[in-house]
Image (tube, grey):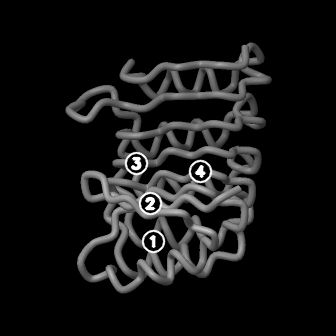
Amino acid sequence: MRWLDLEGCGLPVAAVEAFAHSPVMRGLRYLNVGGQYSATEGVFGTDGAAALAEGPAMRGLEFLRLSYQRIGSFGLEMLLRSPVLATVRELDLSNNDIGDDGAISLAACPHVARLRKLNLQGNAIGRDGTEALLASPYLTSLRILILDVRGDQLDLTAQLRERFQSVPHIASVQGATFFEPIP
């Protein structure tokens, strides 16, 4: 199996653990376990992030969508410590209660060096986290960054443009700012 789309299925942690360790899932390249905006149940949180991080079948993923799973900065740190993210090119962590600590950890992680697209929209990343992303020595392959830039961070917009050189445009959509360097 190379493609698994379970968006909105409300997976319990036990199900995440089962497929993350299943030999059938080895070779999986695309995994979407994004939740739903209004979900109050079926959100796997930090325990689900830990299950993915520990799952040998998750190594080799190229696309990982974990939106609305409430993994938080702690769950993100579990993922960052595992080799799961080392092959991921597109990572969607939108709306996951990730704060500055999570963004700082992500920026300092060598496992994110292959990322080409990163979605951090809808998180509580402030100035410190944004500055860490700007200074990251590992986000050199990043072509698309989706990040909320709030009022106290507007002065960082020019620095974000400079850091991700060859930016053809910055478009604001629902409070998110998109940075797309030319390949």
Callout 2: SS: helix
Measured in 3D between alpha carbons, the distance from the residue under mark 4 to the one under mark 1, in whole angstroms, is 20 Å
Question: Of the residues under marks 4 and 1, which one precedes in the sequence?
Answer: 1
Closer to viewer: mark 4 or mark 2: 4
Q: CA distance from mark 3 to mark 4?
A: 12 Å
Q: Callout 4, which amino acid?
A: Lys
Give the residue pinned by disc 1.
101
Relative to residue 53, is residue 66 drawn left or right? left
Residue wearing tag 3: 94
**Left or right placement of residue 22 versus residue 27 in this view:** left
Question: In the visual, does 55 lie left or right of 41?
Answer: right
Question: Which residue has dot 4 on it?
Answer: 117
Q: Position of residue 131 (x, y in %)?
A: 48, 81
Q: Are circles 2 and 1 on residues that touch, CB within 8 Å?
A: yes
Helix, strand or loop for disc 1: helix
Closer to the chain start, of discs 4 and 2, is 2
**CA gap, disc 2 and disc 1:** 6 Å
Which label's residue is closer to the chain start, 3 or 1? 3
Which residue lies at the image location 68% right of the left edge and 34% below the top edge? Answer: 55
Q: Check disc 3 and give the amino acid type.
A: Ser
In this rendering, the answer to whether 148 lies above or below 161 is above
Q: Does 29 sit left or right of 127 as displayed? A: right
Disc 3 or 2, which lies upstream in sequence? 2
